[in-house]
Image (tube, helix red, strand yellow):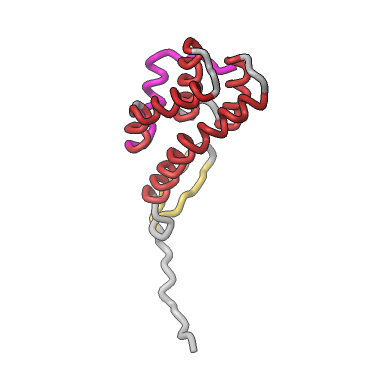
Amino acid sequence: MLKEYNQKQLWEYYEKLPYDIKEKFFSPEIADIIWNICQKNNIPLNDISKVSKLVGAVVLKILPIDQLQIEIENELKINSSSAQKIFKEFNSLIFSSIQKIDIKNKKSSISPDKKEVLNEGNQVKLKSRQNKDTYREKLE
Protein backbone atom coordinates (compact mmCIF):
# COMPACT_ATOMS: atom_id res chain seq x y z
CA MET A 1 0.00 0.00 0.00
CA LEU A 2 1.24 3.46 -0.93
CA LYS A 3 2.30 5.62 1.99
CA GLU A 4 0.33 8.85 2.44
CA TYR A 5 2.21 12.11 1.91
CA ASN A 6 1.07 15.62 2.73
CA GLN A 7 1.10 18.38 0.14
CA LYS A 8 4.36 19.90 1.40
CA GLN A 9 6.17 16.56 1.13
CA LEU A 10 4.84 16.00 -2.39
CA TRP A 11 6.04 19.45 -3.48
CA GLU A 12 9.51 18.66 -2.09
CA TYR A 13 9.65 15.53 -4.28
CA TYR A 14 8.32 17.52 -7.23
CA GLU A 15 10.99 20.23 -6.82
CA LYS A 16 13.72 17.58 -7.10
CA LEU A 17 12.55 16.56 -10.59
CA PRO A 18 14.40 17.79 -13.68
CA TYR A 19 12.71 20.68 -15.48
CA ASP A 20 11.61 18.56 -18.48
CA ILE A 21 9.88 16.04 -16.23
CA LYS A 22 8.20 18.83 -14.24
CA GLU A 23 6.74 20.12 -17.50
CA LYS A 24 5.37 16.69 -18.36
CA PHE A 25 4.03 16.07 -14.86
CA PHE A 26 1.05 18.43 -15.18
CA SER A 27 0.73 18.29 -18.96
CA PRO A 28 -2.63 17.70 -20.62
CA GLU A 29 -0.92 14.98 -22.68
CA ILE A 30 -0.24 12.85 -19.58
CA ALA A 31 -3.75 13.46 -18.26
CA ASP A 32 -5.20 12.36 -21.61
CA ILE A 33 -3.06 9.22 -21.65
CA ILE A 34 -4.21 8.27 -18.15
CA TRP A 35 -7.84 8.99 -19.06
CA ASN A 36 -7.66 6.99 -22.30
CA ILE A 37 -5.98 3.97 -20.70
CA CYS A 38 -8.56 3.95 -17.92
CA GLN A 39 -11.45 4.26 -20.37
CA LYS A 40 -10.03 1.54 -22.61
CA ASN A 41 -9.73 -0.80 -19.63
CA ASN A 42 -13.18 0.00 -18.20
CA ILE A 43 -11.89 1.64 -15.02
CA PRO A 44 -14.80 3.36 -13.23
CA LEU A 45 -14.72 7.18 -13.17
CA ASN A 46 -14.30 7.32 -9.39
CA ASP A 47 -11.15 5.14 -9.64
CA ILE A 48 -9.35 7.24 -12.27
CA SER A 49 -8.08 9.59 -9.55
CA LYS A 50 -6.55 6.58 -7.76
CA VAL A 51 -4.75 5.61 -10.96
CA SER A 52 -3.53 9.19 -11.47
CA LYS A 53 -2.21 9.24 -7.92
CA LEU A 54 -0.28 6.01 -8.51
CA VAL A 55 1.18 7.24 -11.80
CA GLY A 56 2.18 10.49 -10.11
CA ALA A 57 3.82 8.58 -7.27
CA VAL A 58 5.98 6.69 -9.78
CA VAL A 59 6.99 9.91 -11.55
CA LEU A 60 7.88 11.50 -8.19
CA LYS A 61 9.87 8.35 -7.35
CA ILE A 62 7.78 7.73 -4.24
CA LEU A 63 6.54 4.43 -5.63
CA PRO A 64 9.04 2.14 -7.38
CA ILE A 65 7.86 1.38 -10.90
CA ASP A 66 8.08 -2.37 -10.26
CA GLN A 67 5.41 -1.95 -7.55
CA LEU A 68 2.91 -0.12 -9.76
CA GLN A 69 1.21 -3.21 -11.16
CA ILE A 70 0.62 -4.59 -7.66
CA GLU A 71 -0.70 -1.23 -6.44
CA ILE A 72 -3.07 -0.97 -9.41
CA GLU A 73 -4.33 -4.46 -8.70
CA ASN A 74 -4.87 -3.71 -4.99
CA GLU A 75 -6.30 -0.19 -5.32
CA LEU A 76 -8.73 -1.02 -8.13
CA LYS A 77 -9.43 -4.56 -6.94
CA ILE A 78 -8.87 -6.01 -10.41
CA ASN A 79 -7.24 -9.24 -11.55
CA SER A 80 -3.52 -9.55 -12.16
CA SER A 81 -3.71 -9.80 -15.95
CA SER A 82 -5.78 -6.58 -16.21
CA ALA A 83 -3.38 -4.77 -13.89
CA GLN A 84 -0.45 -6.02 -15.95
CA LYS A 85 -2.06 -4.79 -19.17
CA ILE A 86 -2.67 -1.33 -17.65
CA PHE A 87 0.87 -1.22 -16.28
CA LYS A 88 2.37 -2.07 -19.68
CA GLU A 89 0.38 0.71 -21.33
CA PHE A 90 1.54 3.27 -18.75
CA ASN A 91 5.09 2.02 -19.09
CA SER A 92 5.15 2.40 -22.86
CA LEU A 93 3.17 5.65 -23.11
CA ILE A 94 4.37 7.58 -20.04
CA PHE A 95 7.28 6.10 -18.13
CA SER A 96 9.49 5.26 -21.10
CA SER A 97 9.53 8.90 -22.25
CA ILE A 98 10.13 10.14 -18.70
CA GLN A 99 12.95 7.63 -18.29
CA LYS A 100 14.58 8.91 -21.49
CA ILE A 101 14.44 12.48 -20.15
CA ASP A 102 15.90 11.34 -16.83
CA ILE A 103 18.76 9.50 -18.54
CA LYS A 104 19.49 12.48 -20.80
CA ASN A 105 19.62 14.82 -17.80
CA LYS A 106 21.91 12.50 -15.84
CA LYS A 107 24.33 12.22 -18.77
CA SER A 108 24.51 15.97 -19.28
CA SER A 109 24.90 16.86 -15.59
CA ILE A 110 28.37 15.34 -14.99
CA SER A 111 31.10 14.65 -17.48
CA PRO A 112 33.11 11.62 -16.32
CA ASP A 113 36.23 12.92 -18.13
CA LYS A 114 36.41 16.02 -15.96
CA LYS A 115 35.13 14.89 -12.57
CA GLU A 116 35.50 11.88 -10.36
CA VAL A 117 32.95 10.80 -7.80
CA LEU A 118 34.40 9.70 -4.49
CA ASN A 119 32.16 8.00 -2.00
CA GLU A 120 33.28 8.66 1.57
CA GLY A 121 30.81 7.07 3.99
CA ASN A 122 27.46 8.77 3.45
CA GLN A 123 28.92 11.82 1.70
CA VAL A 124 29.50 11.99 -2.00
CA LYS A 125 32.08 14.54 -3.12
CA LEU A 126 33.06 15.68 -6.57
CA LYS A 127 36.75 16.14 -7.14
CA SER A 128 38.53 17.44 -10.24
CA ARG A 129 41.14 15.08 -11.55
CA GLN A 130 44.54 16.30 -10.45
CA ASN A 131 46.78 13.52 -11.71
CA LYS A 132 46.77 13.87 -15.46
CA ASP A 133 48.92 11.44 -17.36
CA THR A 134 51.10 13.59 -19.65
CA TYR A 135 53.14 10.69 -20.95
CA ARG A 136 51.90 9.40 -24.26
CA GLU A 137 53.54 6.60 -26.15
CA LYS A 138 53.56 6.76 -29.95
CA LEU A 139 51.52 4.16 -31.76
CA GLU A 140 53.07 2.57 -34.83
Q: Outermost residue toward the right?
A: 80
Rendering coords of residue 41 (x, y %): 55, 23
Q: Which corner quadrant holds the N terminus?
A: top right
**26 above or below 134?**
above
Corner quadrant of residue 131: bottom left
State the extent of the magenta-drawn residues as a range: 1-19
The residue at 44%/77% (across/down) is: 135
Residue at image position (48%, 16%) is 48
Q: Can you tell which quarter of the image residue 116 is in?
A: bottom left
Q: Nearer the viewer, residue 77 or 38?
A: 38
Position in image of residue 117 (x %, y %): 46, 50
Total marks shown come to 0
Pick the front one: 97 or 93: 93
- In the rendering, at what x and y percent does residue 92 appear? 51, 38
View extreme (bottom): residue: 140
Q: In this rendering, is residue 130 above or below 18?
A: below
Q: Is residue 14 left or right of residue 38?
A: left
